[in-house]
Image (cartoon, rainbow, N blue to C red):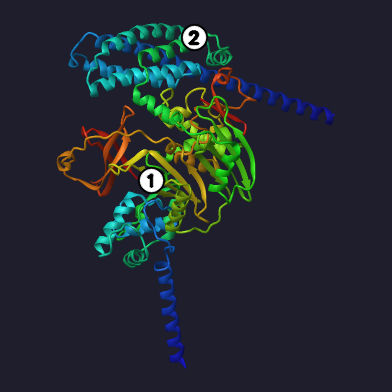
Amino acid sequence: MGCLLIMKKIIFVLAYALVVITVFAVNKTSESEKLSLALGNQYAKKMSDASEKLEELDSAVKQTLLFNESEGSVKAREDIWRLSADIKNSVASLPLDQSFSTSWMNYLGRIGNYAKEVDSSGIPDDYHTVMAQASKNLGQMKNEWLIATTGLVNGRYSVDEWSERLNAHNGESNWTNISHSIKNYTESDFPLTASESDRMKKKELKNIDEPKVTQAEAIKRFQHLFPAVSNDVIGVEMSKPGAPYPFFHIRFTDGESLGYIDITEKGGHVLSYLSERPHRKTALSYEEIKKKAEEFLLLAEYKDLVFEEARENETAWHLVYVRKEPFYEAKVFSDTIHLKVAKDTGELIGLNAAEYIQKEKLHRQKVNKIDWKEFFHEDVKIVRNELSYVENEKFEQRLAYYLTVTRDEQGHTGTYNVLVDTENKDVIKTEKLN
Amino acid sequence: MKKIMISLLAVMLVISVSFVFSDGQTDAFTSRDLSKGSTGDDVIELQARLQYIGFYNGEIDGKFGYGTYWALRSFQEKYGMPLDGIAGTLTKKKLVAASSYDEKFVMDNLKKGNQFTHYGGKPLSSQVKQGGGKKENIHLPSKYSEQDLNLMANAVYGESRGEPYEGQVAVAAVILNRVEHPDFPDTVGGVIFQPGAFTAVADGQIWLTPNDRAKEAVLDALNGWDPSENSIYYFNPITATSKWIWSRPQTKKIGLHIFCH
């Protein structure tokens, strides 16, 4: 009798638990479906907004082609820049095929920048030719965009189904074809400018014209620069064939230190070096750290550098040095070396010299005097004025006044770096300093 | 005898008082000089003391930036010292004599992430607002914010916590390379949360709490290190589902990740 009662109780508890679990599962599924639906709706809305803006962009491009005078199409050109930035943001936040979204973003960025630059540098002779072609291609792309996004916009696919289709594409789908055509349009409508191409060449170390070093020579270079950690090299690999520049990737472990160094095959230049190890609580003074860093720079024969800034953190100091060109004695901010120095021993635990290897090509430039009292508001105080070479928006290296200025901001002293072109007085960059 | 005892007690009292006083005042700073770029507890004390006497109006965060620099120079000017913006022995001595520092108050509020100030002449208890979030004691290049660091540390930890240090720096560098690249969004948040860009975002691992190693890796990337050699993609060949990623030109393999362009 007692046994039957216990059985009944167990059955009741189990049945009750089953009901609770079922209700919970139904609720969860329903909640998940609701969330999925809400997300799908959001994506559909964004896609449809982007389609509308694409229509507006197409129209703005066409409007700029109506006029010869720059004033006539100022607003339309501003619209091109604004709309292309808006669509770019939408594309960035939508679940799209990766190759499709990257090629779209690049095209949109280029068309927007082209329209923006026209305003600062005047209408070039080929504006109508470039934009007429862009308008034709944009119309084509607009149609392809509508076809590509229709499944999610009209609710034919859920977010999951849409994601599955994206992941399953086999390289021959519509997406790939569209992204190929957008890439082609980008290259034909907005080819790289000379300064963009120079910038790319510097990044990809295209102009190193030095003999190749062997693996053994690369290791020797490593041992010369970092004798304390280079006794036990645990692996040397050549970069993969797709690397823009070939380099040796050397991994090491020595005592407590573990790290890597990358050295170019052409010329045996250090790209970067990092060593990881436990750190003690003790700390050398900043002067000792800086002295150790500068001793290393001499050893490595980095001789044309000047100190720029230093930042202390938990275990190390990060120090920045920039090249100083001899003619104007200007700092070249694109030719920089970063050092990481351990606080406990002053050992160099990081070197980043990739930007320094291929020096910037610099051009002489007119240095016009500027009346700073007229240039700045009366409450601005200049605390440093040097010359430097910096990259402007068009990726050109320009000689600039490198000013540090302060201004009272309701009891705080705000400090800014302001870079002003020495020839045309353009403000190339303004940066608030912490 | 009674007089001697009283005198002894008085002397002991004076010594104790002066010891307590000196412990809080002259021996407070460490012996090192503090200059622009310095970070740490002694910078916290420097800022708190400068604020106590009204020279510093910024946040007490332990990072010696331009705000602290100008405040220190103003103090040096007022006290007739050389204007070098460096807190050396003489400057610190003068500052200790001229100000007061409630270390417990400051450190407690920093630990709790409260918003607070440390001005003299009004009760400290009235200078605290609860909340505001705990700040990292990390000195970043000017173009990056603490939010960039934290978001990237989350992404790096979620994506590559089992990878070698070099691999973690490389993942952080890929994020920054994308920010600079015309094919991608131009903010750290935009890049990290681009749909389908990072597995850790899709599976929620981005919200794990990152460790100090991940933060250090991000810090190195923010300071310019790029072991990925300008890569804008990486993938794990064992788990990658996208066939397209294999079509990208590969640069280097670090740990389990292949980095590519």
Up-down: is A79 above or below A298?
A: above
* Quarter-of-image position of residue B242: top right
Q: Chain of mark 1?
A: A
Give the number of the disc on residue A177.
2
Amino acid at the residue labelled 2: Asn
* Quarter-of-image position of residue A286: bottom left
Residue at x-position 55% and y-position 43%: A221
Amino acid at the residue labelled 1: Asp
Near mark 2 (Cα within 10 A), the count class, few <14, some 14-19 or many ≥20, is some
Near mark 1 (Cα within 10 A), the count class, few <14, some 14-19 or many ≥20, is few
In-front residue for pair A53/B173:
B173
Q: Chain of mark 2?
A: A
In the figure, is residue A43 to the left or right of A23? left
In-front residue for pair B184/A345:
A345
Residue A106's spot in the image, x, y percent? 40, 19
Q: Write down the residue under mark 1.
A: A304
Residue at x-position 62% and y-position 25%: B237
Residue A42 visible in the displayed image: no
Give the quadrant of the C terminus of chain A.
top left
Residue A22 visible in the displayed image: yes
